[in-house]
Each structure stands twice: as C-alpha cells, then as structure tokens.
Amino acid sequence: MVILENLTKAFQTRDGPKIVADQINAVFPPNRAVALLGRNGAGKTTLLKMIAGTLNPSSGQIRRAGSVSWPIGFAGSFHGDLTGAQNVRFVARIYGVDTRELVAFVKDFAELGPHFHHPFRSYSAGMKSRLAFGVSMGIPFDTYLVDEVTSVGDAAFRKKSAAYFAERLKTSGAIMVSHGVEQLRALCDAGAVLERGRLHLFEDVNEAIAHHLQSIAP
C-alpha cells in the first residue's frame, strides 16, 4: 500500500513554477495493479520517483506499507566502475536477498552474455535497462513501480519481460506507466489519471482509460 498525504511537487522554469503534484491525497491499495495515465509532461515519472524515494516532494509525505521497488528499468543507482555482476551483488546485500541466486537469475534473464562481467559504464542504454529490469524482477516486492516495462530490448525480450511481470502481479501490486493502452488493460485492474497536479483514482482501469482519452482529445 502507498499513501500520498498532501503531496506537492513544483519545479521552477523560465515561465514560472510548474506544479506536478498539488496537495494530492490518495491511496494505492495493496495487491492491485494501477495504471497511471496522463498526457506527456503531466509528471507521471516524477510521481513514480517520489513514491520510490529517489526524488523528494516539495511538501507533504508518502507512506509505504510493505516493500516498494525502484522504478523498474531505472539504472541510475548502479556504479559505473563495477561490472554488472558486481552491481547485482551490491543490490542483493542491500535488500537482504541471496547473492548467488540473484546473480544467477539476472545473468540468465538479462541476456547480456560476457558483458555481464564488464564495467557498467561500458553498457549501452538498452543493456543498462536489461540489467535493471532483471534485478527488479529477481527481488520480490509488495509493490512494483513500472515505467514502460516492456520497452527494453528486442521483441522476444519484451515478450519475456511482460510474461514474467504478469506472473509477479499474481502476488504483488503495481503502479504502472505505459503509452500502450492495451498493455494497461491486460495487466492492470484499476487506474489513476494525473491532470494539472491532481490525481483522479478509478476502481476500473477501463474507466481511467476512458477519462484519460477524453481529456487528451482535441
């Protein structure tokens, strides 16, 4: 469960403050997959980062019950001079999971071949995302934060990633951002729409999608 209490986030721009979250009060329930929708620039990724704890709000607070992942695919916390395998071991120690099991899982899942033992800074953007996604899937979380989960790699890897993530959702919740409406319909059962700093929650994902499509219609 994730609870937002008077959550506010604003950025200063040349045109004045841009408000991403305007005193949002909302509850993301446990064991539900919630589609997070909104037009480009609405602040969906920013909201995920605040929920993950990698970005501080301007005011208000976020309460988390159970374990919450970092945004899946986000590789910003990996150390560039360590190899992929060494980074995985480091994450395993932080989260208290079996190091050998996680390394073996990520090595097989990420399909990096010999690059798994090369410095992380030598990776392409796609390779970094594969490693980050593999680590995320290798650790059981109560709530997964997802930003375009299947956009990484070729078609076969995207299909595998989507199938494995769907399996995780049988025992976990999620807050998921995707431009693929049909993917959201397939994976999520509830929805939320971020508009002008306000968050509208819907029990039915189809109602959330309909609201979003209407709001962006010309």
Image: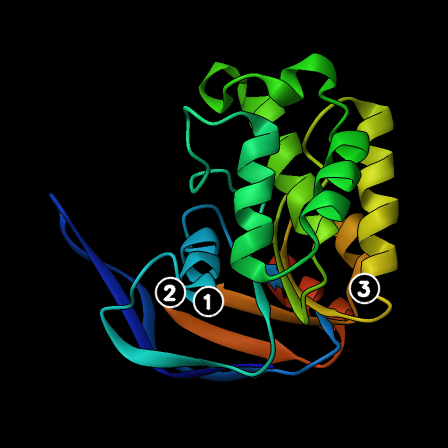
How crowded pointer 3 is (Cα within 10 Å; few <14, some 14-19, many 20+) is rated as some
> Considering depth in this image, is 107 or 34 the residue closer to the camera?
107
**Structural distance between the alpha carbons of marks 2 and 3:** 29 Å
From the viewer's perspective, tell me whether residue 54 is left or right of residue 14.
right
Measured as percent of width and height from the top left, residue 163 is found at: 88, 46
Which residue is tagged 2?
196
> Which residue is depicted at the point 43% across and 42% down?
77
Point out residue 29 in the picture as x, y percentages from the top left corner: 65, 83
- Work out which quarter of the rendered image holds the N terminus and state it: bottom right
N-terminal of the two: label 3 or label 1?
1
Contact flag, marks 3 and 1 (Cβ < 8 Å)? no
Q: Nearer the viewer, residue 144 or 24?
A: 144
Residue 204, position as x, y percentages in the image: 76, 76
Question: Nearest the camera: 14 or 106?
Answer: 106
In the figure, residue 84 lies in which quadrant?
A: top right
How much space separates mark 2 and mark 1, taking CA atoms? 18 Å
Badge 2 amino acid: Arg
Question: What residue does disc 1 label?
Answer: 51
The local secondary structure at tag 1 comes to helix
* Image vertical order of residue 207 relative to residue 179, above or below: below
Q: Is residue 160 left or right of residue 119?
A: right
Q: Which residue is mark 3?
A: 169
Identify the secondary structure beneath mark 2.
loop
| Amino acid tagged 1 | Ile
Q: Earlier in the sequence, mark 2 or mark 1?
A: 1
Q: Residue at x 53, y 76 (%)?
A: 200
Q: Is residue 159 above or below residue 3?
A: above
Q: Amino acid at mark 3?
A: Leu
